[in-house]
């Protein structure tokens, strides 16, 4: 039998991962947090995308919304997200950022990470959407690294 920490202990432990150093990765993380916590129609993240991407903001924003919807529909385990103001990342958030970093050059590793995160081996659709998000960022000169 595995002992689980008491809820009070979970609240007092620091989050395990620092924020990404790359601005584009931080924008990706912020959008995951905002859309996950406030819903797919969050106007705050839309404003961030308008500022970051200019007139071409719609493609990355819509793809982020689709990605978050597919993550929620496919996940068989909880994906923990921190509040937007947190200066560190949860393990789930760090995994999502790592998947985005590995999609181009290590797609099988990205697939395995996503399958483990979601607790589901059928993640090809979500992974394809994540690749489209990465492409939308890269096409605007905002590579997620």
Image (cartoon, rainbow, N blue to C red):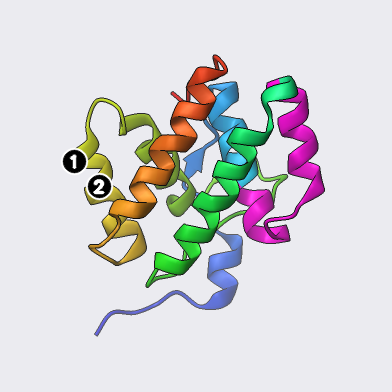
Please tell me which residue is depicted at 40% across the width and 67% down the height of the picture.
Answer: 75
Comparing 51 with 32, the one in front is: 51
Q: Residue furthest top?
A: 141
At mark 1, the secondary structure is helix
Q: Position of residue 13 (x, y in %)?
A: 54, 58
Image vertical order of residue 15 relative to residue 140, above or below: below
Image vertical order of residue 78 relative to residue 56, above or below: below
Q: Quadrant of the N terminus?
A: bottom left
Residue 47 lies within the magenta run:
yes
How many marks on residues?
Answer: 2
Q: Residue furthest left?
A: 108
Within 10 Å of disc 1 (Cα), the crowding (few <14, some 14-19, many 20+) is few
Q: Position of residue 21 (x, y in %)?
A: 53, 23
Question: In the image, which residues are magenta?
Answer: 32-53
Say if residue 88 shows up in the picture. no
Q: Position of residue 27 (x, y in %)?
A: 62, 32
Q: Are marks 1 and 2 in contact (CB under 8 Å)?
A: yes
Please tell me which residue is depicted at 74% across the width and 42% down the height of the picture.
Answer: 45
Magenta residues: mostly which secondary structure? helix
Please tell me which residue is depicted at 61% across the width and 43% down the height of the picture.
Answer: 62
| Mark identifier at residue 108 | 1
Residue with the mark numbered 2: 111
Comparing 115 with 41, the one in front is: 41
Residue 13 lies within the magenta run:
no
At mark 2, the secondary structure is helix
Within 10 Å of disc 2 (Cα), the crowding (few <14, some 14-19, many 20+) is many
C-alpha span from label 1 to label 2: 5 Å
């Amino acid at each position: 039998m595995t002992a689980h920490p008491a809820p009070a202990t979970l609240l007092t432990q620091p989050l395990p991962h620092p924020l990404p150093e790359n601005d584009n990765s931080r924008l990706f993380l912020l959008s995951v947090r905002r859309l996950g916590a406030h819903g797919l129609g969050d106007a705050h993240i839309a404003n961030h995308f308008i500022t970051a991407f200019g007139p071409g903001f719609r493609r990355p924003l819509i793809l982020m919304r689709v990605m978050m919807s597919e993550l929620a529909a496919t996940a068989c385990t909880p994906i923990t997200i921190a509040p937007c103001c947190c200066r560190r990342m949860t393990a789930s958030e760090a995994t999502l950022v790592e998947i985005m970093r590995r999609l181009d050059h290590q797609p099988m590793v990205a697939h395995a990470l996503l399958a483990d995160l979601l607790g589901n081996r059928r993640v090809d659709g979500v992974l394809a959407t994540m690749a489209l998000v990465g492409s939308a960022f890269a096409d605007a000169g905002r590579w997620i690294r």
